[in-house]
Image (cartoon, coloured by chain):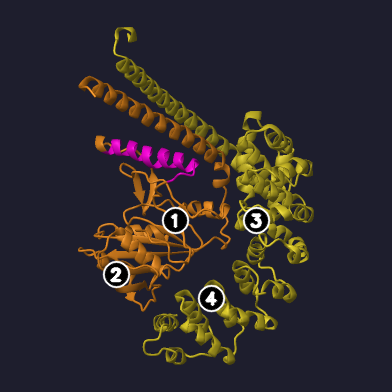
Amino acid sequence: MTQASFIAWMTWTILAYFIALNLGYLVLNLLSLASLHRGRQEKLLDELPQVFTGLDPAISILVPAYNEEAGISASIRSMLQLAYSDFEIIVINDGSKDKTLEVLKRAFALRPFPEALNPQLATQPIRTIYRSTIHANLRVIDKDNGGKADSLNAGINLARNPLFCGVDADSVLERDSLQRVVRPFLRDWRVVATGGTVRVANGGEIQDGFLTRVRLPTNIWALFQVVEYLRAFLFGRLGWSQLNAMLIISGASVQQTGSGTNSTR
Amino acid sequence: MLSTISDPALRVAAVAGAAAVALTLAIGVLILGLRLHARHDERRWQDFVAQWRPLLLGAMLTPLAPTLPALARRDHGRFLRLWTYLHESVRGEASDRLNRAALDLYMDHSAREFLRSGSRAQQLQAILAAGYLKDRGAWDPLQTMARSSDGLVSVNAARALIRIDALRGAQLLMPLILARHDWEVTRVAVFLADARDAFWLLLIKGLPTMQAGDLPRALALVEALRLQLPAATLRYLLDPAQPYDVLCSALRLAATPELAREVRACLAHEAPKVRSQAALATARQAGPDDVAQLAALLEDDQWPVRLAAAQALASLPFLSNAQLAGLQRAGGAANDVLGQVVAEREWA
């Protein structure tokens, strides 16, 4: 191959890649717009007063935390106020080097508890398991550092509910997020995992652990981040979801199979 | 300008680039337009609520027919949205008075029109309205919609049919209720509460001949509606040959001593979930003689079964903490779960 023909070949390849990539984005955008339109039509039902029947499946919220002393207590407090009939929160302190555990102990009056662990998934050694004396649905695992996946696996071993949901310790959930995330499981028995849209909270107003007003950030780089999150999380995931082709599920709620195959690694 | 570019690759790149820029601009304009439209809509909605909410609240409270102002045709959708929201929160007389207000404004006609030729959102609104108004004139279109492949439209149409005529609705919808897995059991259970007795009768008749695939859903509804099945029906459902999810549901429903033999037989079932559920069901009616059988499950090779057995034992009022702790033994597989349930008892 001569140099000229190689350059021509490279030129056409890069051009074809650019066109294919942008056409792909266009298709995903159109698919997600159709999905958003459908969701908007159902807004009427969403805004009606919600009835808690007590029949919805119970959910275990797993919160891996590594060096989160600054915000962990506010995050957990907001999660405790989520509007859902039956859920438990399991915080996994992944060998934090700061005072994450001390903050949790103080804020939620934790006491060591001889909790039995289902040994279905191997994890780093567990040091102690705590229960809150104030909130019956809050437990904390203190374990050696092993990373996020290892923490989630430890949480799965302790979870007692049929569904579990992984949430970052610095995330803010909307109050009705559990009701929404559980719906696909109720409407289709083949669903094994669902996820939510992750958005950038920079610039927004947060009160008592809940986002009360959505605004754009003033920092130019944060603005780019907003666009990137919209592309990746809103349009990307919604579009792929229409094709039943999701490769990654953010903030996933997952159905426990009971066969020890839920490893998040 | 394109004609001045001789390189074909550059020409394609220029066209693709221009198309990308044009599309970006188009999306920008679209977003701006949608945003302006949404703001305008929201303002109109707030104005409408400010005017009509007090009127409808007044209509709910007074036994006399209120004089309501004329409603512009473009506001019919907004009226039904507000009216449905209020309806969802009230019962009895207040609900009847809301209906009277809607009928005075001929909203039943609007709802039927939306049902016939509205957008999907308008149809959903009309389905809810027809149900609340108990509008028999909407029965046929609702019946058609209940068979629609759109899960949300069909389940809400079914709800409206039950509201209009509980018995007839339950008879008509029974096959759909069991077959439509996209209808949430929780949602169906809420609206079937109006037709609880009719559903119970139909279910008792249909259970023995029901297809195996429909049984788990039928039993989930029985649980959700807190219905009691006759012992003979439960005995049939507790047959060890039944699928394990049917057995699990039946074990949760088996609460009478006359089923003790069938429940205890499930303690040795091959499926761990069935053994766990059988342990909990046994505990509900257990006497001191059952402790040994439950304690044997503490040595089960499945951890969830050991936990269920420990929880079952801990729920027995005649077993003291010391007796529970006494079941622990050196190297015992169930020491962890027994330690937990004893601690839970002490914390309670």
- Check disc 1 and give the amino acid type: Ser
Residue range in magenta is A222-246
Q: Which mark is residue B276?
A: 4
- Residue placed under numbered mark 3 in the picture: B188
Does residue A47 appear anywhere in the picture?
no
Cα distance between the residues tagged 4 and 1: 24 Å
Label the orange chain with its letter.
A
Disc on the earlier residue, 4 or 3: 3
Mark 1 falls within which chain?
Answer: A
Which kind of residue does numbered mark 2 sit on?
Asp
Mark 4 vs mark 3: give the one in front: 4
Please check whether the numbered discs 4 and 1 fall on a single chain. Answer: no
- The answer to which of B74 and B317 lies nearer the viewer is B317
Pointer 2 residue: A142
Give above or below for A5 relative to A52: above
Could you tell me which secondary element the residue under label 1 belongs to? strand
Percent position of residue B199, x then y: 74, 61
